[in-house]
Image (cartoon, rainbow, N blue to C red):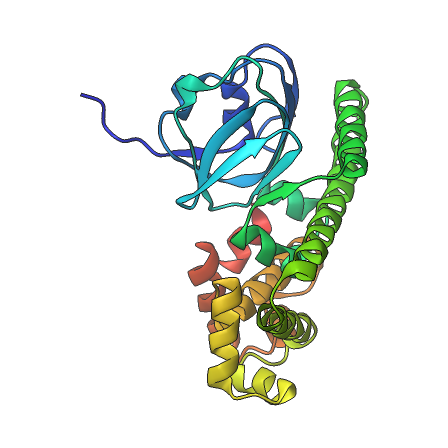
């Protein structure tokens, strides 16, 4: 009798699922594939948890899947975005049709950090991914994505010493393109949304913009509520309802992202980083960082 087995998926493990076809990768940093055949469904019989950023674009055919227990039907022209920690399951993988063609792009969190992308710039768009990870691309957006995929495949085939840096630049650009796709998708949805939903959405966006600007100095809900002329209780309620995350969760994520960027990309001491992020003490910052990342600041900097 088979037992349940959850797999933590990385770019190199994604490669195991892909049959012969056009696919290239760089270890656990990056993987790109233009899937022409059915994936090896024996690897997809159980849910898996993403340990990387993934984009799956359905070129032809269709496939059913769930993301964090929510069901989605991917058809031609649909882009599915998966972020680290998401739980994904392919529904009835043995029934995937032979006509299924999917383009996959995968990048590890460390690769994203190392190429200098600051995910805090994508927080508004991240709300859309959390609520609905599927986007139906326009014909112009499809063409743009195909161009990026072709260029990434061509670059990865080369053997010069700056291939990784070249791919890093492309991945950075792709991230911004995906953010643009999400923003345009949100704009189309807002035109059809009820006024109340739109107002709540605008309040969330106002909070996130304030948080991006002020989180390094202000860590308390009351500060943002005062700025927005609402009560802390009401702000907390709206942010949780619209985004699925609490105000402290958003602020903590921003602080962790800033800390990681400073540790990886500056020569600042840990004490200087703690002061820069307005923690009451270096030991408090140490505990905060370890609680949220599982590593000490020094361990993260040295890895």
Which residue is rendered at x = 79% and y = 39% of the image? 169
- Is 157 positioned to the left or the right of 199 in the image? right
Q: Nearer the viewer, residue 45 or 218?
A: 45
Which residue is rendered at x = 58% and y = 68% of the image? 197
- Is 91 positioned to the left or the right of 213 in the image? left
Q: Nearer the viewer, residue 117 or 295?
A: 117
Q: Quadrant of the N terminus?
A: top left
Q: Residue furthest left?
A: 1
Count of numbered circles on the image:
0
- Is 177 positioned to the left or the right of 257 in the image? right
Q: Is residue 255 above or below residue 94?
A: below
Q: Position of residue 19 (x, y in %)?
A: 54, 13
Q: Position of residue 181 (x, y in %)?
A: 72, 47
Q: Position of residue 196 (x, y in %)?
A: 58, 73
Q: Is residue 243 above or below residue 131?
A: below
Q: In which quarter of the view is residue 106 placed?
A: top right
Which residue is rendered at x = 51% and y = 35% of the image? 73
Q: Is residue 15 above or below residue 56?
A: above
Q: Nearer the viewer, residue 216 or 78?
A: 78
Q: Residue furthest top?
A: 20
Q: Quadrant of the C terminus?
A: top right
Q: Is residue 120 visible?
A: no
């Amino acid at each position: 009798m088979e037992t349940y087995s959850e797999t933590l998926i990385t770019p190199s493990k994604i490669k195991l699922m892909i049959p012969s076809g056009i696919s290239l990768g760089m270890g656990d940093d990056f993987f790109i594939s233009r899937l022409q055949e059915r994936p090896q469904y024996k690897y997809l019989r159980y849910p898996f948890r993403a340990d990387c950023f993934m984009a799956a674009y359905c070129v032809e055919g269709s496939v059913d899947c769930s993301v964090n227990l929510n069901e989605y039907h991917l058809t031609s022209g649909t882009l599915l975005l998966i972020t680290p920690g998401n739980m994904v399951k392919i529904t009835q993988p043995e029934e995937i049709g032979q006509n299924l063609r999917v383009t996959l792009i995968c990048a590890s969190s460390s690769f994203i950090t190392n190429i200098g992308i600051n995910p805090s710039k994508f927080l508004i768009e991240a709300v859309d991914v959390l609520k609905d990870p599927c986007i139906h691309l326009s014909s112009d957006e499809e063409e743009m994505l195909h161009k990026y995929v072709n260029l990434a495949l061509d670059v990865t085939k080369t053997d010069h010493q700056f291939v990784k840096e070249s791919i890093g630049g492309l991945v950075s650009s792709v991230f911004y393109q995906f953010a643009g796709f999400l923003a345009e998708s949100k704009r189309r949805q807002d035109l059809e949304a009820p006024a109340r939903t739109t107002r709540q959405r605008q309040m969330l966006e106002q909070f996130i913009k304030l948080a991006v600007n002020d989180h390094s100095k202000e860590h308390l809900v009351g500060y943002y509520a005062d700025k927005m002329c609402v009560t802390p209780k009401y702000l907390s309620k709206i942010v949780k309802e619209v985004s699925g995350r609490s105000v402290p969760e958003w602020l903590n994520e921003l602080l962790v992202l800033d800390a990681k960027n400073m540790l990886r990309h500056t020569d600042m001491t840990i004490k200087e980083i703690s002061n820069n992020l307005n923690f009451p003490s270096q030991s408090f910052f140490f505990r905060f960082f370890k609680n949220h990342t599982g590593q000490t600041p020094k361990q993260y900097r040295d890895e």
